[in-house]
Each structure stands twice: as structure tokens, then as C-alpha cells.
Amino acid sequence: MIKATAPGKIYLFGEHAVVYGYPAIACAINKRTEVEAEKTRNKDITIIPKNLSFKSIKFSFGDENRYNIPKKELKSLEYIRKSIKKILDKKDQKIGLKLKINSELPISGGLGSSASVTVATIFSLKELLDLDLSRREVANLAYEVEKDVQGNASPCDTFTSALGGLTKVEKNKELIKNKAPAIPIIIGYTNQQSNTTKLVEEVKELKNKYPTIINNLFNNIKKITEKGQKALEKKNLEEIGNLMNINQGILDSIGVNNLKLSKLIYVARESGSYGSKITGAGGGGCMIAITENKEKVSNAIKVTGGKAIKTKLTNEGVKIT
Ligand code: MEV
């Protein structure tokens, strides 16, 4: 039996603009997904999830109909099924597997839950089946799975989950990995799922309607991200906070905020944060705040109807436990 865990992530700067090739910075967080994998005697694949959107499931590749799996459940299983298939195809053997999956990350909350499930599944199986794959190779396989399931995905989530630390992503450039800065952070979850595909589509429509305005806004996000990178290196909390607030103003202006998120962002500022913003696609999901008053900000988030997630930025990518 092998147990692997992989982290989720937050976007510190640059989400949405990154879809159009502008730079963004993300960092791994110490909220993780754990996958416990073992071989079984028969040829079935059994998945036992905890905190995911489906119940325990048994199937065999190519014979899913025999197991009467509801279509909706099959869809939410896609990341796991395709991850298993990627590894079994490399081994070229039909073996039975049992996987127990437990995630600390909210599903569709903007914290990279699907990437962490995918990376942890691939990593646990490559260990179980003795395959020689580096963390970067695992990140690439996980990215192929994400692209396959979502149609269009950024490599940022899977890369950050596999390697840990800070990731700078920019079109046509190698992804850059740096050390996670030791800055105090709180995540606020709206308890609403975020629909990334829909939000990215809405931003695209806005950009088609007002190309000059939106391109100028994205150019400003690029400047914020570049200044933010330096502020993160210097751990200058005041500057990081200011830049997050400006980044948030732009995210608001492109229509990806909503009332619940907005309330959490403002109560975090008013209860003693250097800055706060949406993290990820928005329209629900999560916000982040930079603060040394973690208790006060967490309480303010809770009182406003959100869930405070206390976490730290981490250098630990996927690992065997
Ligand atoms: C979603 O977490 C972040 C977006 O920038 C989309 C993406 O980068 O794939 C909105």
C-alpha cells in the first residue's frame, strides 16, 4: 500500500489575464489531497472517496456500463479514471486497484482541488507500480489529464501541485519555480462553487466587446504581477497587500466578483489585512487576505457567512507519506 499527498494552490496575482498570455503567480498551500493506493486480486478498480462529489465506485476499464455508474458520477470521476489509465497504459498490464481518496480542499473552490487529486493519484500509482517518473513528468501527465477533462487548462495548477513552492506562469515561457515566501495568509471560502469555464467565457465576451479597455486592464495586471513578484521576494507585506487590492479592483471591473466574495474581501480589509482579493476564477469560490491578525480576520470571515481556511504557503509538492 502506498500513500501520496499533493497540495492545492492559490493565485496570488494574475488570474484571468493569464488566459491571454499575461503572467500570473501561484503558490502551493498546505491543504492537501491524500491518495492511498493498493493492488487487489481481481481486475476491478475500486474508488473510495471522502469529501468528494461522488460515492464509492467500482468499475473495470472498457466495461463501465456493467457497473451502472450514474453519468454524473462518471463525469466527476474523470480526473481519477484518466489518471489511473495514464499509468496503467504505461505498465501495459491489467491489474486491480483500490484507491482511497481524501481531500482537504473545497471542490471547485479555486484552490486547485482537481489538480491535487490528479497529481496525488498519478504519483501514488507510479510508486505502487515502480515506474521511474520525475515530479516534472508527473506534472506533465497530470496536465494532460486536466486538458483532456476540462478541454482547456493552464499547466499552473498541476505544476504547482507536483513541485510545490511559487510558480510564475507566462505564455511561451518555461514555468518558473521559486521558494514559497513565508507570508501570513488566510483563505475565505464563500461556500459557493466557482464555475471557471463560464467565468472565462464571460470575460472573453467582455474582451471582444471592449478590446482596448480590457487589454489595457490586463496590461495593468501584468505590471501588478511583476511588481508583486519583487514584493514577494522581499516579503514586503504592505506592498503585496496594496498590489492585491489594485488587482482586485480590476477583477471586480471585469465582472468576476459577486456579493458574497465581495463582503469577505472587504471584511478582511476592515479587520486588519494588508490586502485581499479573489483567488482563482471568482463568482464564488475563495478569496485570500494577507494579515498578521489571523484570528481577527478569520472571525470576520466566519461572521460574514464564509469559511475561514487557515493555511501556510508551502514548498512541499507531491510526496509519499
Ligand atoms: C482559474 O483558477 C484561473 C483562471 O485564470 C483560469 C485559468 O488560468 O485556467 C481564471
Image: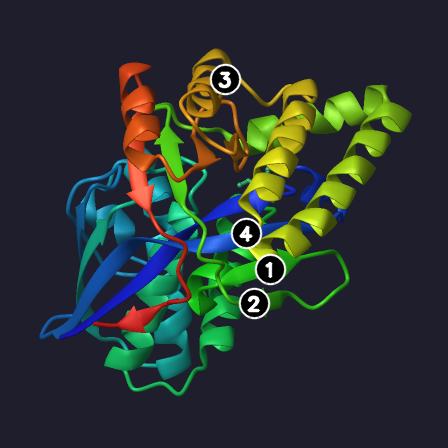
Q: Amino acid at mark 2?
A: Asn
Of mark 3 and mark 4, the one earlier in the sequence is: 4
The quarter of the rendered structure image containing the C terminus is bottom left
- The residue wearing badge 1 is 233
Tell me if the residue at label 1 has its CB under 8 Å from ligand 1: no
Nearer the viewer's eye, disc 4 or disc 2? 2
Q: Going from the N terminus, do you reach mark 2 or mark 3 first? A: 2
Q: Secondary structure at mark 2?
A: strand
Cα distance in 3D space between marks 3 and 1: 28 Å
Is 301 situated above or below 74?
Answer: above
Q: CA distance from mark 1 to mark 2?
A: 9 Å
Compare marks 1 and 2 and give the one earlier in the sequence: 2
Residue 140: image x %, image y %?
Answer: 53, 68
Decide which of tag 4 and tag 2 comes sooner along the chain. Answer: 4
User: Gap in Å between the C-alphas at discs 2 and 3?
Assistant: 30 Å
Please indicate, yes or no, whether residue 84 appears anywhere in the rendered image. no
**Dot 4 corresponds to which residue?**
26
Looking at the rendered image, the disc whose residue lies closer to the viewer, 3 or 1, is 1
**Image quarter hosting the N terminus:** bottom left
Q: Residue furthest left?
A: 41
Q: Residues within 10 Å of mark 2 (few under 14, many from 20)?
A: some
